């Protein structure tokens, strides 16, 4: 029997309490499993927004996709995480990444570490949370070898950015999943594999708006962006078939879409459940 899917969506703009609550109720009603908030300056503050969403719903899980570990001291983060866990009745899923936007570190008046230092700090945070909040599901998202090694060994959910486009004879997503398997073979069968969708059609044209994807992969052409795992094209049925292929080919069962896609993807979810 094929494993069940889980679906989430990222809330990027909800300036008032009422709009957060409305989106949370709509997400729960549409059948989403998790509502996510990112961690960027200029975006909603993650924990207050998530707490507001949780208070307006009954079964919807809430999560961060993803916290910039470099912004947090482990003990202070563990305090907030355990409080959120308790206040939401165990509905929190914590997503972490190493951070990558230099300008945000500078705006926060935090020195911008090297890539190695950022991953080292992520490991430090993860180890502390493993000791002080071991019952909070942990998602780690990224693409590099050192980060994915930490994820394979410590997380319950692996966020596969899969940013490289598929090319003739190559499958970057399959290669990254194989790397995760080799990094922790004894844990691999228990891991949940995730992909965040950054572009998909929201009308009948079948053509995705690539503007969000382009922010993360500015060096790629439109043709290359269309070949990345985070971009979906075609009809509702086409997209459902592609999501099934992600599960059958790669073992990916957890899909996150973005706020503009929530209603269009709900039609896809109906075909997959």
Image (spheres, rainbow, N blue to C red):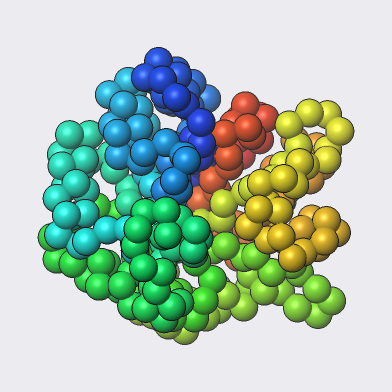
Residue 146 shows up from this direction: yes
Displayed quadrant of residue 156:
bottom left
User: Which residue is painted at 33% across and 78% down in the image?
Assistant: 120
Residue 193 shows up from this direction: no
Displayed quadrant of residue 168:
bottom right
In front of the other: 260 or 219 = 219
Number of numbered discs overlaid on the protein picture: 0
Q: Is residue 249 above or below residue 152?
A: above
User: Which residue is painted at 86% across and 33% down in the image?
Assistant: 205
In front of the other: 273 or 225 = 225
User: Which residue is painted at 77% across and 64% down in the image?
Assistant: 220
- Left or right placement of residue 255 versus residue 147 in this view: right
- Left or right placement of residue 22 versus residue 244 in this view: left
User: Which residue is painted at 71% across and 74% down in the image?
Assistant: 171
Residue 132, image x, y percentages: 13, 60
Q: Image quadrant for the C terminus?
A: top right
In front of the other: 193 or 163 = 163
Residue 223, image x, y percentages: 85, 59
Residue 234, image x, y percentages: 82, 42
């Amino acid at each position: 029997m094929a494993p069940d899917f889980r679906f989430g969506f990222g809330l990027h703009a909800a300036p008032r309490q009422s709009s957060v609550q409305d989106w949370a109720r709509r997400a729960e009603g549409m059948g989403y499993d998790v509502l996510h908030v990112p961690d960027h300056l200029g975006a909603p503050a993650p924990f207050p927004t998530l707490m507001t969403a949780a208070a307006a719903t009954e079964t919807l899980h809430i999560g961060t996709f993803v916290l910039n570990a470099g912004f947090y001291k482990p003990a202070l983060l563990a305090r907030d995480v355990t409080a959120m866990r308790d206040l939401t009745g165990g509905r929190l899923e914590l997503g972490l990444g190493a951070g990558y936007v230099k300008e945000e570190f500078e705006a926060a008046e935090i020195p911008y570490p090297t890539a190695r230092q950022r991953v080292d700090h992520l490991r430090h945070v993860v180890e502390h949370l493993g000791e002080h909040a071991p019952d909070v599901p942990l998602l780690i998202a990224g693409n590099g070898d050192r980060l994915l090694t930490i994820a394979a060994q410590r997380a319950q959910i692996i966020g596969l950015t899969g940013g490289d486009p598929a090319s003739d004879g190559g499958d970057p997503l399959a290669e990254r999943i194989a790397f995760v398997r080799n990094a922790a073979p004894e844990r691999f069968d228990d891991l949940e594999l995730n992909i965040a969708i950054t572009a998909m059609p929201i009308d009948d044209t079948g053509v995705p708006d690539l503007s969000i994807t382009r922010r993360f992969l500015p060096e790629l052409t439109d043709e290359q962006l269309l070949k990345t795992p985070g971009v979906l094209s075609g009809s509702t049925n086409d997209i459902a078939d592609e999501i099934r292929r992600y599960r059958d080919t790669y073992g990916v069962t957890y899909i996150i879409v973005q706020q503009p896609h929530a209603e269009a993807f709900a039609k896809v979810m109906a075909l997959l459940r």
